[in-house]
Amino acid sequence: MEKIYLDNAATTPVAREVLDAMMPYFSEKYGNASSIHSFGTEAKEALEDAREKIANKLNANPYEIVFTSGGTESNNLALKGAALSNRKKGNHIITTKIEHGSVLKPCKWLEKLGFDVSYLDVDEYGLVDPENFENSIRDETIMVSVIHGNNEIGTIQDIDEIGKIAREKEIYFHIDACQSFTKTGINVETQNLDMVTINSHKIYGPKGIGALYIREGVKVDPLIHGGGHERKLRAGTENIPGIVGFAKAAEITTPGDVEKMRELRDYLIKRIINEIPNSNLIGHPQKRLCNNANFTFKFIEGESMLMLLDQAGICVSTGSACSSHALKPSHVLLATGIPPEDAHGSLRLSPGKYNTLEEMDYTVVNLKKIVGRLRELSPFK
Ligand SMILES: Cc1ncc(COP(=O)(O)O)c(C=O)c1O
């Protein structure tokens, strides 16, 4: 059997249609979008066409899309850029305890500059309480930044509610939508979003390209200085092949893809919970990303399960300490109240649109065997 890739929340393969769309922009249509000659205008047209396609997916104005090198850079630009540009308004930022490192680390950096950051708690399912958010708003609050679909536990936040409060209190609302983009609807108008981070490599596009939606009028300082590219917010010659690929990837996603991922996810969840004793689903049972199935398996280590699954040709990920090169298990799992010893036994299976039900069967059969084998050896059982 060929290898089974069940780590689509980490990254996805580039879709054939995406690759085909990108190819001409490497060695035929290779102009610099800032050049005035025909090679340049050809690149510029591709750039603006892509901007429009991405904007359409968010119900945004193309002008409000700023291309970046990916989710990490977009989150840095949103957090640091808005904080630095709005220092006169205040020094307070609100975020959550379950953010990706590309939000948490900029927050830590801003704290060193004198900003004050509130990290909101989440409940056992990983949900932020909008009331708790409202109570944490002060006169000096500049913005709130919330991860839309969590990359580890899959929980999707109630951004409609948070957006309403943020708009009423006149603070900027940023979401990190790297995991949710194209998987669940995002509408910058109806959801009162001021900034949205998205990237390409989670949606069958190339790596190293992403965007930040910045609502017109929202004040953000650039982090990368140079030419006047991207509304003077992100200097550097635009990565046209990457941008074309990103837009194509966004364009070709269908509700059918989402439905298929959901079916695979639900099949995995049902079989694993029913057939493997002492396995628990992490994250919200309903409000969750279509491609996220994450479990804890008591008495054993995620790392060992991961290695043995890999030997069986199945690639997954874990929130266990060793695999993330950290001493503590995942901050996200701990924030939901999972005890550290259980967090060490977590496994994330993330199906994608190219996976099949047969692959899920093969995975469950092997996982059952591996969990059984490891438990026999476990001193904790
Ligand atoms: C929720 C979330 N935010 C940000 C990122 C970072 O994106 P990128 O890999 O494009 O820098 C990722 C991907 O790892 C992610 O899952």
Image: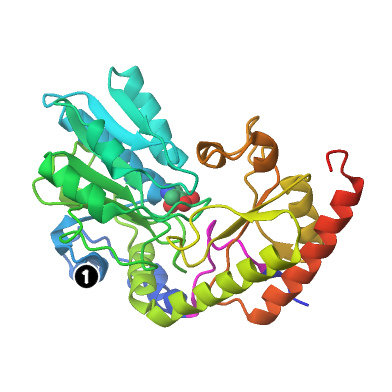
| Location of residue 38 with respect to 341 vertically, above or below | below
User: Residue at (66%, 58%) from the top-left corner?
Assistant: 316
| Location of residue 42 with respect to 10 vertically, above or below | below
Task: Tell which of 193 and 46 is nearer to you.
Answer: 193
- Which residue is the extreme one toward the right? 377
**Quadrant location of the N terminus?**
bottom right
| Location of residue 121 with respect to 240 vertically, above or below | above
- Which residue is the extreme one toward the left? 217
**Quadrant location of the C terminus?**
top right
Q: In this view, does 104 lie to the left or right of 85?
A: right
Q: Is residue 56 left or right of residue 121?
A: left
Let me know if residue 24 appears in the view: yes
Give residue 324's quadrant in the image.
top right
Whole-percent x, y for residue 278 in the image: 73, 53
Whole-percent x, y for residue 54 in the image: 27, 66
Secondary structure type for disc 1: helix
Magenta span: predominant SS is loop
- Identify the residue under disc 1: 56
Give residue 134's quadrant in the image.
top left
Magenta stretch encompasses residue 127: no
User: Residue at (14%, 63%) from the top-left corner?
Assistant: 61
Total numbered labels: 1
Give residue 235's quadrant in the image.
top left
User: Residue at (27%, 60%) from the top-left corner?
Assistant: 32
Let me know if residue 232 appears in the view: no
Colouring of the image? rainbow
Q: What stretch is highlighted in magenta?
A: 5-16
Q: In this view, does 124 lie to the left or right of 324?
A: left
Task: Tell which of 214 and 225 is nearer to you.
Answer: 214
Q: Residues within 10 Å of mark 1 (few under 14, many from 20)?
A: some
Give amino acid for label 1: Asn
Whole-percent x, y for residue 151 in the image: 49, 52
